[in-house]
Amino acid sequence: MSEQQIQKVKVKRLAHVGLWSNDVAAQARFYRQVLGFDLRNTFDNSTDQDIDLENANVFLSLGEEHHCLGLFSDIRPSTGNGRNPFRRTRLHHLAFELDTDAELAALAARLSQSGVELALAERDGDPDLGDTLWFSDPDGNRIEISVTPEDSLASSSVSVGGRRTRLRPQALQHIALQTPQLEQMVDFYTEALGFDISDWLLRESAWLRCNNDHHTVTLIQGKMDVDHVGYSIFNGPELLTWADHLSRYQTSVLWGPGRHGAGHDLFLRIADTEGIHIELSAELQQYYDRDVTTPPRLWHTRPMALNLWGSIPSWMREEVRV
């Protein structure tokens, strides 16, 4: 393996997000009933919709992938005292994918050269799926890297006739993380994992890409936690369909519809049963810069970067992270 191969390799896509949950059953019910996810059995991969979820960790999917969302029963010991409990991150782990075993080996070599402590494990507990690389980013977030399965079908929310069977997002699109050390995290994701910077908002936010999408990871200065998880939808007009659909399930729209300046996508924001924000996104800006260098854009004002239509919710204005 050449030094050039080691230095050029980069992750290609966000495979799934793992979240801690205080009530896995309620969370799984929300994602299945309101957002149309399919339930995967963690043990035998069956799709029995009546499985007992009370104490189980569950995988949920939007297509033929094993899962794009994992919910893990929060068994972490409590910290802090009763009056001032310590707020812990709700992120269990992030999983990214590469295209080949050679790329996985090259990435492992580069991380090892950088002094990152690595561990190997079976992917999803199945030795037939190959190895998974585990390590932590500078905030201590657990990261999983594996090779995309050969039989993976990315967009199977469409029936044989080309029409979707029910309203649900197309795919997992991005993760936004709050971090108390923005610059160190940006350096790690760009230098160790090969991300490119699409946009900067002063010392507050950075949007990072690893494929054609404008961003796969957004890093935001703040207390370490999940800011939101983003899912792509078919197009802009579908946002209105989603707004009506969510109202039928008494799920409030927290922000939007709007249009981000950074990424230029149409969006709306909701929350799941445990308050984790979910963003539905359409028409995200695409990059086709494989053979050229595209410099990051620098935004100077929050309103223009976050919503070109001008509306920023009060809970976001109160948490200016600069």
Image (spheres, grey):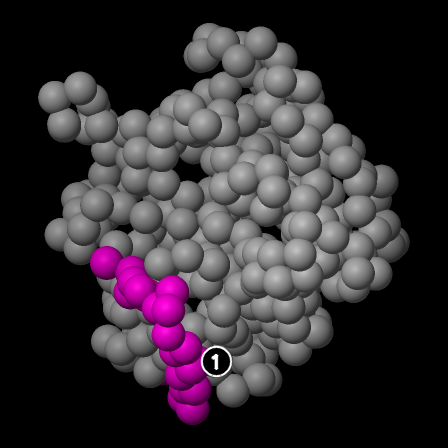
Among all residues in the image, which is located at the extreme bottom?
Answer: 300
Query: Residue 16 versus residue 179: which sits nearer the camera?
Result: 16
Is most of the magenta stretch helix, strand or loop?
Answer: loop
Residue at 49%, 29% (x, y): give it: 149
Name which residue type carries label 1.
Trp
Q: Position of residue 140 (x, y in %)?
A: 76, 56
Among all residues in the image, which is located at the extreme front?
Answer: 2
The residue carrying mark 1 is 200
Q: Secondary structure at mark 1?
A: strand
Query: Residue 196 versus residue 305: which sits nearer the camera?
Result: 196
Q: Identify the image quadrant of the C terminus.
A: bottom right
Q: Quadrant of residue 185?
A: bottom right
Label 1, residues with CA under 10 Å away: few <14, some 14-19, many ≥20: many
Residue at 48%, 80% (x, y): give it: 200
Check residue 285 for magenta coloring.
yes
Counting the numbered discs, the total is 1
Q: Is residue 99 left or right of residue 172?
A: right
Residue at 28%, 29% (x, y): give it: 157
Q: Quadrant of residue 247?
A: top left
Check residue 199 for magenta coloring.
no
What segment carries the magenta color?
A: 283-303
Q: Position of residue 120 (x, y in %)?
A: 76, 36
Q: Position of residue 246 (x, y in %)?
A: 28, 41
Q: Is residue 287 left or right of residue 298?
A: left
Image position of 280 with respect to 157: above or below: below
Query: Residue 139 versus residue 287: which sits nearer the camera?
Result: 287
Residue at 41%, 44% (x, y): give it: 172
Q: Position of residue 102 (x, y in %)?
A: 61, 42
Please say whether residue 168 is visible from this viewpoint. Answer: yes
Q: Is residue 239 left or right of residue 268?
A: left
